[in-house]
Amino acid sequence: MSDIVEKTLTALPGLFLQNQPAGGPAAAKASFSSRLGGLIRGITALTSKHEEEKLIQQELSNLKATVSAPTTTLKMMKECMVRLIYCEMLGYDASFGYIHAIKLAQQGNLLEKRVGYLAVSLFLHENHELLLLLVNTVVKDLQSTNLVEVCMALTIVSQIFPREMIPAVLPLIEDKLQHSKEIIRRKAVLALYKFHLIAPNQVQHIHIKFRKALCDRDVGVMAASLHIYVRMIKENSSGYKDLTGSFVTILKQVVGGKLPVDFNYHSVPAPWLQIQLLRILGLLGKDDQRTSELMYDVLDESLRRAELNHNVTYAILFECVHTIYSIYPKSELLEKAAKCIGKFVLSPKINLKYLGLKALTYVIQQDPALALQHQMTIIECLDHPDPIIKRETLELLYRISNAQNIRVIVQKMLEYLHQSKEEYIIVNLVGKIAELAEKYAPDNAWFIQTMNAVFSVGGDVMHPDIPNNFLRLLAEGFDDETEDQQLRLYAVQSYLTLLDMENVFYPQRFLQVMSWVLGEYSYLLDKQTPEEVINKLYKLLINDSVSSETKTWLIAAVTKLTPQAHSSNIVERVIQEFTISLDTCMRQHAFELKHLHENVELMKSLLPVDKSCEDMVVDASLSFLDGFVAEGLSQGVAPYKPHHQRQEEKLSQEKVLRFTYLALSFSSSGFTGRQSPAGISLGSDISGNSAETGLKETNSLKLEGIKKLWGKEGYLPKKESKTGEETEALPIPQESIMENVDQAKTKKDQCQVLTQSKEEKEKQLLASSLFVGLGSESTINLLGKADNVSHKFRRKSKIKETKSGETAHSHSMTCSSVSSLSNVSYDEDYYLNTLQDRGDKELKKFSLSLELLDSEPLTELPLVEKLSNCNLSAPSLFADNDMEIFHPPQSTAVSVAKEMSLASSFLEETTECIHSNLMEVCNNETISVFSYKIWKDDCLLMVWSITNKSGLELKSANLEIFPAENFKITEQLGCCLPVMEAEGTKTFQYSVQMEKPFTEENLSGFINYQMMDTHSVQMEFSINLSLLDFIRPLKISTEDFGKLWLSFANDVKQNVKMSESQATLPSALKTLQQKLRLHVVEIIGNEGLLACQLLPSIPCLLHCRVHADLLALWFRSSCSTLPDYLLHQCQKVVEGS
Amino acid sequence: MTCFILIQNWEGKTRLAKWYMQFDDNEKQKLIEEVHMVFTARDAKHTNFVEVLNEYFRNVCELDLVFSSYKVYTVVDEMFLAGEIGETSQTKGLKQLSILQSLE
């Protein structure tokens, strides 16, 4: 990369030099150069940021005057734009010029247009309203006969384009895929890639054209199409397995040097293309032995060919290694890949070392032994002078952390933390430390001290979950009450010591944590009296460097301690000083304290000791105000109506739903949008795009050897670790390495130990304490159990977060809101519900009843049928859903008839629910496997029935479904049948729930059986499930529809052309009702309201309106992706039929 | 996917900024500062990308590039689109650039 930039840039001065013609233009150019040059020189000469600001503001006001003057020519405008770009780049606001940039792109000649487009792409963001004004210009330029104009239009479209206007340019861009110039084709493909990024449903129908681009005769166009494929395969790898062969062939050609030399880079053939292909293969071969086998050869060859010592070959090698570790493993390749990683890690070159560490982080899950091999290098990297290497090493350590090495790893992380100044690094690191501390804390003292470090350094930038979770942990406690008390007491003592230190400033968040803990748990102290604690809090209260928010926490703590205090001098002083505070909030708190202080009994009952986890009984109906209300009513005051009721009334007054108004009122109501339910590990997301996979990997990895310390089961202190307190960083004794580390390796280590210098010995010891518990055996043994523990913890944190929004705002007198969740049982349903938006919660209140389509006959669902059929072995046989033309190969007509009768008898048994036709998913001479779907109210029930066609007895027939990421699959009945009688049939039932929306996804599994004690046979099958299998009608009233509509944040709009046969509203609605199972709520004139829900309970609403033969669809849902997916389905049925 | 392309000089002055994801102004400034901190904290010989450009800016002429900054953007736009590398062939890229150049 660097070299490409370098070369291109080296060529630039040539380009600029050509560009010095004499005469008029030169003069203009000179003046432009000098103007921008003057500005730049001026800035360079300045010494302070303040002066720069002044100069640029001056420049901006000049520019503002020039661009708005009517006499300004386009040429001058172009120069102004360049200067505006410069100012904007330095971070100053040049928004007054945006509209002029669009005008310039519209009106200018080629060069001016180019600058106009450039300015637009730099100034505006995707959702900027002005972007709409650009659409016409783009459409015009796309139709231009001048290739340069077409190129510019395609370039701008690939950079920035309003999502909702894609239909306006899509046909034009699709045409360009057939253009004779390859550069146009290439840019068109990239434009479609951009559309795929921002609105995948809009380009779903042109997948076939992507395939054409993949086969394009020009390498550049083909390479561009890979960007789209990487994304599509990432989303649904099963849909593209058939392309594996093509990708392998392309890679073979590239590696074999069959491409034009144009694409060589430092005599490496098309390296970027290789990298893309390797990534694609990695995605396709994941967990799929058959597909992986296709690529072993080419991967081997790639590894072999990438020998040149150049950065770009290292990149290829890195990708290769990554792919080899992602796909179904092959030992020879793994060996080579491990060797390659070893070379990287041991290299003295920083960039290679970095790649090696990065690769280790990727593969650590599959191959912990590899990290053990390189443990000494990793230790050295911890003290590496390069910060990037250091950071990557910590990331690696984070992934291998477990209960045994936690002290050392966290210590290393803290050391790095104290040196760091960058905010992202701090946020990231404190998040990880807090996460590890909560998970593996070996004892109270260590936990509190580590958290103290986290709070002091992370302070006000850390994720708010960290203090919230910490307080919750303290408050909720565990089963062992005495342990809980010790932990709390330790925290209290530690904070009092910290507060005793003079001239030390703590971050506000830390002070807040301290004041809550002191307020709640000071009663545990023996020596200090509440007065002493209050005195310390008072000192903070009168400290100017403490923020007023923290002061409300402090005064809350004082209030809690007041009933325990014997003398009240200090409390009275607080009251005296703060009832005259200028801060209204403080004054209110002080007055509350004052009034409570006058009535000690009331105060004690209000602020009981150690009851933060118990729910307070609050009269939520505010019945004590009834008298006041009655008085008001009697004086003719209008009765109170809740907000949504008022909305509703306004609506009904206008008879017709006016959605423009709704949309406005919605946005002004301050809906906070979706909260991402990510847990505390959010902090680690910043570490880059590896974070997603990282989380998954760490999930199983860092739990090795976990002691259940902080689980729900209770705090389980390990008594032996008491000695560890004095010898904190001391390594684990040698025997423990013996236990865990690879035998051979250990022996070697021991030999080395004898000959090592002292310093080396230290490193060795550090290594043994870091890599303890990493051996392959412990991995396997502990994985299952460990996973459980972490899961529980994570789940709790997530639930916590959904509440934290409320917690943060309520500095109530007791500050006990943190605890309100304490007694909730976290069963699966609750968990799911809390993760959903508020909209969902509201939905529950309406207690909506669901229904399946009112007894529509089965054959009315051809779409679902078609979708489910596409991946079957002989799809054409099922084309018209007619069971009678069903001819499983290799079986006689008689047996077919038998099978049919047998299988359909199952259908009869289950006909209360709607179900699909029976279809064969796989067969051989002995058995046939049929399957059908039952669309139950609350789930999709998949039934597989295995029919034994032979006259022989089959043993241990078994059916298993592969776990799939997007599904939650539950087995309904026991499914292992010991002996399958001759010509018998056996059914297996699984209920399937969708975990996250998708369009289509394969569910696969296998069947195995044994025949007459001879051999066991295994057959794989897969079934295609579509989103529609999980859509159920949502029966709600128009009124509920209105309320829900207002509460949903995600919407999608699109106009769809109706086919001629059904160009009326009722027929279109009927189609939607029959094919998509939407519930028609009401039809008002030319508008229709429909509702459905995605199982288990994600609602989606649809408003449609007819204009001539266009159907305007408007979806809203609490889920951000659902509307897109549904729109796609609607489009298909409305346009298609 | 590339999130942004930045060219800075040693002093941390931005010479080119191209964003492929939506950031607000504060985030942009923060990123620019942090990127600069990361790179200056590293030993000069390890920062290949920035180093090459810095060498180029210093020795060839930083001002030349700044005066024609929009041409540098043109180069970037020809090579990257939608956050992905668009043109992998140098010869082809330069050919297209010279066509664009001939407009002036």
Image (cartoon, coloured by chain):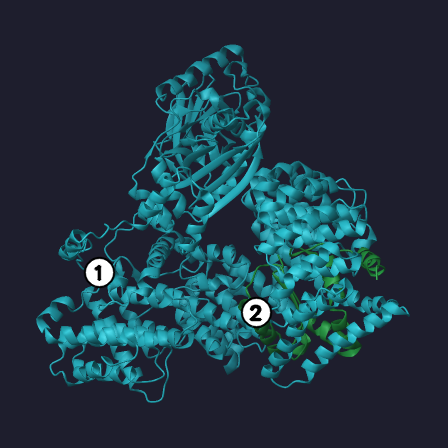
A474 or A130, which lies in front?
A130
Residue A527 can be seen, yes or no: no
Which tint is chain A?
Answer: cyan
| CA gap, disc 2 and disc 1 | 46 Å
Give coordinates of residue A818: x percent, y percent: 28, 63
Which tint is chain B?
Answer: green
Furthest residue toward bottom: A502
Left or right of A937, for residue A41: right
According to the image, label 2 marks what residue? B31
Q: Is residue A831 above or below residue A1134?
A: below
Furthest residue toward top: A894
Query: Of the numbered discs in the image, which one, if any, rests on residue A479?
Result: 1
Q: Disc 1: which chain?
A: A
| Quadrant holding the C terminus of chain A | top right
The amino acid marked with disc number 2 is Leu
A1130 or A656, which lies in front?
A656
Residue A726 can be seen, yes or no: yes
| Quadrant holding the N terminus of chain A | bottom right
Q: Is residue A426 above or below residue A902?
A: below
Q: Is residue A1084 above or below residue A403?
A: above
Q: Disc 2: which chain?
A: B
Query: Of the numbered discs in the image, which one, if any, rests on residue A219?
Result: none
At numbered mark 2, what does the secondary structure look like: helix, strand or loop?
A: helix
The amino acid marked with disc number 1 is Asp
Give coordinates of residue A321: x percent, y percent: 62, 55
- Residue neighbourhood size for the residue with mark 2, other residues' Cα within 10 Å, grouped as few (<14), some (14–19), many (≥20): some
Instruction: Give the total number of marks visible in the rendering.
Output: 2
Furthest residue toward left: A601
